[in-house]
Amino acid sequence: MADYVIETWDLTKQYDGKAGCKNITLQVPRGSVFGFLGQNGAGKSTFVRTMLGLLHPTGGKAVMLGHPIGSEESRQKVGYLPELFRYPDWLTGTQLLEHHAELCGLPRAERKTVIRDVVARVGMSGREKERIRGFSKGMQQRIGLACALLSDPELIFLDEPTSALDPIGRKEVRELIADLRDQGKTIFLNSHLLSEMESVCDYVGIIHRGELVVHGEWRKLSAVLPQVEISVEIKGQRFAEDLPAFAVGTELMRRDADQERWLVTLDQEGRVPALLQTLMARGAAVHEVVRKQQSLEEVFLYWVQKKEGEANVAHHENHV
Ligand SMILES: Nc1ncnc2c1ncn2[C@@H]1O[C@H](COP(=O)(O)OP(=O)(O)OP(=O)(O)O)[C@@H](O)[C@H]1O
């Protein structure tokens, strides 16, 4: 049986019957990095805060680490880094961590070692005795991450963990996330930085206007619209004309003296041989065929636009 650390059924949290998130049904497998993607205001934070028991759901139900959300047990092995959280800036990094260690009930005898360990893991060794007032945004985010790791959680929620970091800091956080996953931990990442998520996530959920559009292994989601790049020698014929109906899109990428490079979008997997047969039957010399790996951004846009299209049709039908 699949082992999920999060399972929700129609989980809903709306504010006065509006906005928030609605009917979210998803599963997050243990030991995965799950990216929760959506535009600003899509409902990501509302979902996470509801899971953590900070907001009360207005509908549906959810289980976290085997316990119903809202219960003390569900939160016991959970770490949380809120988005751009402001810490008391008169404290030093170590004082902040000591305070958090006390809050999460870490035995006094272990605190020093655990703090030293989490500080090292987030790359802050040597700076932890400085006051937070003097920390850059990136350092504040790192110390926040250290707080989230103090209780050695099984599940860690990170809300936009790299938004304030420079490219090197982002890379370090990605490595830290991969490292945590290798230790068997599950990371739930909220973000709208799609290129950031691409290399680190195993699973994604796409949320749009409060509703979950799709979720699953992202490399599998990316197969929804297979694309190939084809370089052909065109002999007085136009590539895009009279292609079979399964070639749902064609885009000229480059035109050289004797060759053209086209991006062809197929309606499903397995169409490449038939496409090549058609081209060869027309006498076109095919020089290169390369499968295009879609980016997470393309996958995201595909699903969001699909959802928008469906919403427009429903709106139209309701108004005729
Ligand atoms: N306390 C609140 N009262 C009323 N509406 C709210 C409240 N908090 C959030 N909302 C609305 O709910 C929707 C979802 O907001 P939420 O903050 O969950 O989105 P988000 O995806 O986390 O956005 P961001 O990426 O900007 O943090 C938005 O329309 C927002 O305006």
Image: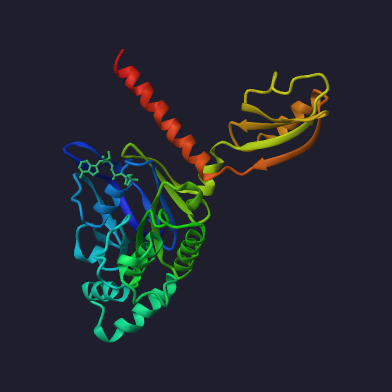
Question: Residue placed farthest to the top in the image?
Answer: 320
Relative to 250, does residue 102 appear above or below in the rendering? below
Q: Position of residue 1 (x, y in %)?
A: 41, 59
Quarter where residue 97 is shown: bottom left
Q: Where is 152 relative to 252, above or below? A: below
Residue 43's image quarter?
Answer: top left
Q: Is residue 297 above or below residue 1?
A: above
In the rendered structure, the answer to whether residue 213 lies left or right of residue 132 reads right
| Residue at the spot 69% in from the left edge and 36% down from the top edge | 229
| Position of residue 66 measured from the top left corner of the image (x, y, whole percent) | 29, 62
Look at the image and tell me in which quarter the C terminus lies: top left
Q: Is residue 203 left or right of residue 85?
A: right
- Please say which color scheme the image uses: rainbow
Ligand 1, seen in the image, is in the quarter at top left
Give the camera-side residue of 286 and 10.
Answer: 286
Q: Is residue 80 left or right of residue 199?
A: left
Q: Choose between 72 and 15: the one closer to the eye.
A: 15
Q: Residue furthest bottom?
A: 109
Q: Position of residue 86 (x, y in %)?
A: 27, 59
